[in-house]
Image (cartoon, coloured by chain):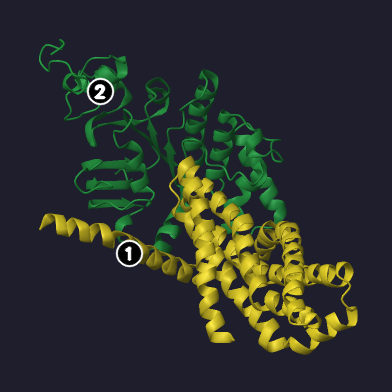
Amino acid sequence: MEKNIVVIKNVTFGYDEDKPIIKNISLNIPQGKITAIMGGSGSGKTTLLRLMSGQYTADRGSVSVFDQNVGSLNNREILKLRRNLGMLFQFGALFTDMSVYENVAFSLREHTDLPQEIIDKIVAMKLEAVGLFGTQNMMPQELSGGMARRIALARSIALDPELMLYDEPFTGLDPISLNVSAMLIKKLNDALGQTSVLVTHDIEASLKIVDYIYFMAGGEIVASGTPEEVQKTNNPIVRQFIDGKVSGPFSFEYDTSLDYNTYIGLDSQSGNLS
Amino acid sequence: MKRIYNAIAIIGSPFTTFILHLGRITNLFFQILLSLAYPFKNFSLIIKEIHFSGVRSIVIIAVSGWFVGMVLGLQGYNTLERFGSVSMLGSVVALSLLRELGPVLSAILFASRAGSGMTAEIGLMKATEQIDAMSVMAVDPIKRIIAPKFIGGIIAVPILSLLFNTAGIWGGYFVGVTLLHLDRGTFWSQMQSSVQFHGDVMNGLIKSFIFGIAVTLIAVYQGFIAKPSALGVSLATTNTVVSSALTVLALDFILTALMF
């Protein structure tokens, strides 16, 4: 039977209790698979990822990671749980006062007593895995956006975590870097036997590498399925998202109680000068 | 009735905000105390912070101390001359610096030079998700970032205060002896006879140590609560300088009342 690394049950969360960002969501992340959480900007994807990493605590429901209820753990227990977890931030979040080498070696130095020579070798191996061996002495300011993201990936896999969380790994990358990153995620997941959760709104790159997709809109899961099922689906929200249509259930405009015509002094019904 | 409630709320709001910050900063202080073992185990982190906040502040502290000493020398000489007691100039300069001006001004200058830098660094780390990244990598940012800065600050401030005092005394000497031709022996002997090591030098150092705790704590706290935006970091650095100056002056009054 398939084991689930992350189990989310009826989770509701919001910064303000009256405005929940996540609304009664339940989902499972199976071991060894790449699961994508997709949806438009502001749909709650990154918030869901941060609930998994224990950065936020659910207002209602439970988030279990490695069979531990994240909400009931104290600070020390959460830090312990995170040793088996890697997270790639949207813009890398490299430590800007440290070189590439020091960034990748950071968790090795913090959590292990490995001798310097072994750390040197592991750093070289991780950098080679992301195609950036030889950049050890560079500073983050000298790297391009794509390179910084790959160095951050090397840093997050330094301790070979069982669970990898990727927050918008393809944002702002050129098509070549984007495909390289997508293939790298797939390769690392398979080679290291990881479980990966990918938060993204990049359809094309994700469909090539993921095993299962959850679609989010307005803080809820509106559809889910394998890439093949998603591509064939008639769900109007998913279709609008995949086809990039302007009109559809996803509204481009901000939901407000203010009437634009009245606000700028026009007749609210006709839009003519009143 | 609602208007009265609103008025009470508006008047009370700054007090509740103050109490809230006081509670949070106290909480941070205890968290730092519980994390002190880590930076002492990784002593290079403390050295780095002493270099950043202390060594790089040496020039501004020494130059400021020199000028403050010169002003004290000049004003002291003019005032003491009226009473025929210019021989007391050495004592006036030394006691003013050791008891009050050295600890207070060096702490305020430290807050402006190094404290604001600490706040900006932590605030920017927060804005660029570096603190989140560290936390997700199972490393407590309070241990790794805040505690070394705190220790570096409380070591640096008393040393900088001593430097300020030394530069200030030489500034006073320069004006009194070199420019205004006061007898050199009188200047030093009066100072030596009136300054007490425990009562003046040590109490001044204790003041500096307490100011160092206050200023560094305010700096790291402001960085830690800074909103992750350009304006948020800018406001936090301003708050560090303003809050530090006010806290140092208020603490100075309390400590002076207790010590002297």
Q: Secondary structure at mark 2?
A: loop
Any idea which chain is the yellow one in this picture?
Answer: B
Chain for disc number 2: A
Q: Nearer the viewer, residue B190 or B161?
A: B190
Mark 1 crowdedness (10 Å alpha carbons): few <14, some 14-19, many ≥20:
few
Q: Is residue A168 above or below residue B180?
A: above
Mark 2 crowdedness (10 Å alpha carbons): few <14, some 14-19, many ≥20:
few
Q: Quadrant of residue A27?
A: top left
Chain for disc number 1: B
Q: Is residue A161 visible?
A: no
Residue A35 in picture, x, y percent from top left: 36, 35
Q: Quadrant of residue B167?
A: bottom right
Q: Amino acid at mark 1?
A: Phe
Which residue of the protein is positioned furthest toward the front in this rendering? Answer: B82
Q: Is residue A174 above or below residue A272?
A: below
Q: Is residue B14 visible?
A: yes
Cα–Cα span, label 1 and label 2: 40 Å
Q: Look at the image and give the colour of chain A.
A: green
The residue at which mark 1 appears reads as B15
Q: Secondary structure at mark 1?
A: helix
Q: How many marks?
A: 2
Q: Is residue B71 above or below residue A208?
A: below
Q: Amino acid at mark 2?
A: Glu
Residue depicted at x 33% and y 36%: A45
The residue at which mark 2 appears reads as A253
Using residue B158 as the reference point, say whether residue A32 is left or right of it: left
Residue depicted at x 64% and y 83%: B203
Residue depicted at x 31% and y 27%: A40
Residue A32 in picture, x, y percent from top left: 40, 40
